[in-house]
């Protein structure tokens, strides 16, 4: 069930759109200052967080257009950054309201927020009126939004002459995709603006897919299984509201990410390394598959603590699991000298493949970040290769769709290491139908014929064997 947003904040248990717009404006302002939306949302009033996340996500997906509209309607940048953010959030929501006028105005999870146009204008003005620094500008907010409603076709056409406004991605991002995917770049841009479904991976140590689906059905929760061990919820919900969360029946993990644990040849007694483990989804998957000795590394102590928390909830922490806060490339600081049978190197990247879930990434990244992360990836996998035993396997993974972080890295790795043999793996996976999940991993028996075809996030996988 979604959180209903109404016109007035006075009714107990109800959340006003004006409060949500103002909270979303604070989050957009934070992103424009270089802070991640996840971090900013964590500081949002818990009572407002669900509604604010939905509106903030929507604003991020339309930020290119909203920025162009604000610049047309208010040519001089507003003196107050929060006012600038409120105008952009309101314009993003208002444009959708105008486009879908007459639809139901309820807000459900991370779906597109839709309201009556007059409601958006009224609530945006109220949001400005309630903030001390914005109150002097409530007339400006009212005039800007009403003018957009009156002149929308002409103003929208003018704004969309700018590719950033048309595609809601930075210009350099658009150009990179045009070069890398000349036949599919527009599809990728559109896919990045569509919210992804909620996907779970069932913990085989504690439950089965059928068991979880039965529990969801009893709770009147729509869900289906498109792939062995996976469950998709078309309507995202808070994890605590789903059966089995506290019992550790499942973890939240995208379909593409779930392949990491399947691509590595894990068996009982192996010595395994998860080199960049936080927040621990892939770590847990490896431990679910077999009784192994596992070392999980991460350079961020706070994120590494989340790995431990997730393993505890899933019942997977044991004496053979070691969590180490360390730089994976600085092998001497954490390696005991005993080689690993299997290594998972889910290395840092631009995260360009997960825009469906993190729409702020496109506005936080800079083009030079691609070269920086590519150099970091190279240093990590080169260092890890020395810790792999002959005959062992190393899986290189990134949640990126930029070739510099995927195929080009894999090709260069084989050239640098004469003892590396590249094995069969999915390679570049795109967040598009028919380009995401290889058919060999689909369970046709479990696939609901009436359910939409599963589409995973953008990911890259390359598997290497170390020759003796």
Image (spheres, grey):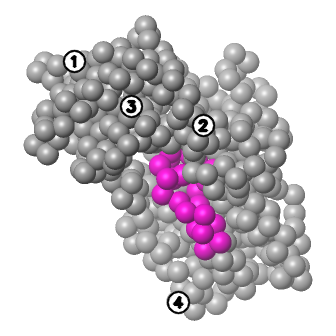
Nearest the camera: 86 or 245?
86
The kind of secondary structure element at disc 1 is: loop
- Callout 2–callout 4 Cβ contact below 8 Å: no
Q: How packed is label 4: few (under 14 Cα within 10 Å), some, or many (20 or more)? A: few
Residue 333: image tag: 4
Residue 387 lies, in percent from the top left, at 69, 83
Name which of mark 3 and mark 1 comes first in the sequence. 1
Question: Which residue is painted at 68% across and 23% down in the image?
Answer: 452
The boundaries of the magenta stretch are 350-372
Q: CA distance from mark 2 to mark 3?
A: 17 Å
- Callout 4–callout 3 Cβ contact below 8 Å: no
Name which of mark 4 and mark 1 comes first in the sequence. 1
Q: Is residue 346 left or right of residue 357?
A: right
Residue 7: image tag: 1
Q: CA distance from mark 4 to mark 1?
A: 57 Å
Question: Which residue is painted at 64% across and 37% down in the image?
Answer: 191
Residue designated by label 2: 161
Which of discs 4 and 1 lies nearer the camera? The answer is 1
């Amino acid at each position: 069930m979604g959180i209903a947003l109404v016109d007035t904040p006075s009714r107990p248990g109800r959340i006003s759109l004006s409060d949500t717009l103002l909270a979303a404006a604070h989050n957009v302002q934070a992103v424009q200052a270089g802070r991640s939306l996840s971090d900013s949302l964590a500081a949002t009033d818990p009572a407002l967080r669900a509604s604010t996340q939905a509106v903030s996500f929507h604003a991020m997906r339309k930020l290119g257009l909203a920025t162009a509209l604000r610049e047309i309607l208010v040519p001089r940048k507003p003196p107050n950054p929060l006012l600038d953010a409120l105008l952009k959030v309101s314009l993003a929501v208002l444009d959708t309201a105008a486009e879908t006028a007459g639809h139901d105005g309820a807000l459900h999870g991370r779906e597109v927020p839709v309201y009556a146009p007059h409601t958006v204008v009224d609530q945006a003005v109220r949001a400005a009126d309630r903030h001390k620094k914005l109150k002097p500008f409530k007339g400006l907010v009212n005039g800007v939004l009403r003018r957009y409603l009156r002149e929308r076709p002409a103003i929208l056409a003018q704004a969309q002459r700018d590719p950033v406004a048309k595609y809601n991605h930075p210009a350099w991002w658009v150009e990179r995709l045009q070069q890398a995917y000349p036949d599919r770049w527009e599809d990728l841009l559109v896919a990045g603006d569509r919210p992804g479904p909620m996907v779970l991976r069932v913990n085989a140590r504690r439950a089965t897919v059928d068991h979880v689906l039965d529990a969801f059905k009893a709770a009147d929760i729509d869900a289906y299984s498109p792939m062995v061990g996976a469950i998709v919820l078309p309507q995202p919900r808070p994890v605590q509201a789903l059966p089995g969360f506290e019992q550790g029946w499942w973890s939240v993990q995208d379909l593409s990410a779930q392949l990491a644990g399947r691509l590595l040849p894990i068996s009982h007694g192996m010595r395994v390394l998860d080199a960049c483990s936080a927040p621990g989804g892939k770590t847990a998957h490896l431990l679910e598959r077999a009784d192994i000795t596992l070392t999980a590394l991460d350079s961020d102590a706070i994120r590494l603590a989340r790995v431990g928390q997730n393993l505890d909830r899933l019942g997977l922490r044991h004496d053979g699991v070691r969590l180490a806060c360390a730089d994976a490339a600085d092998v001497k600081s954490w390696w005991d000298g005993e080689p690993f049978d299997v290594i998972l190197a889910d290395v840092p990247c631009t995260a360009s493949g997960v825009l469906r879930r993190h729409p702020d990434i496109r506005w936080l990244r800079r083009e030079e970040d691609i070269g920086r992360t590519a150099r970091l990836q190279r240093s990590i996998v080169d260092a890890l290769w020395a810790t792999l035993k002959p005959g062992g396997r190393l899986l290189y993974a990134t949640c990126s769709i930029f070739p510099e972080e995927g195929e080009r890295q894999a090709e260069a790795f084989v050239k640098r290491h004469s003892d590396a043999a590249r094995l069969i793996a999915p390679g570049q996976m795109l967040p598009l139908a028919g380009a995401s999940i290889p058919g060999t991993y689909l369970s046709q028996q479990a696939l609901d014929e009436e359910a939409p075809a599963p589409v995973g996030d953008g990911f890259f996988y390359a598997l290497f064997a170390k020759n003796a």
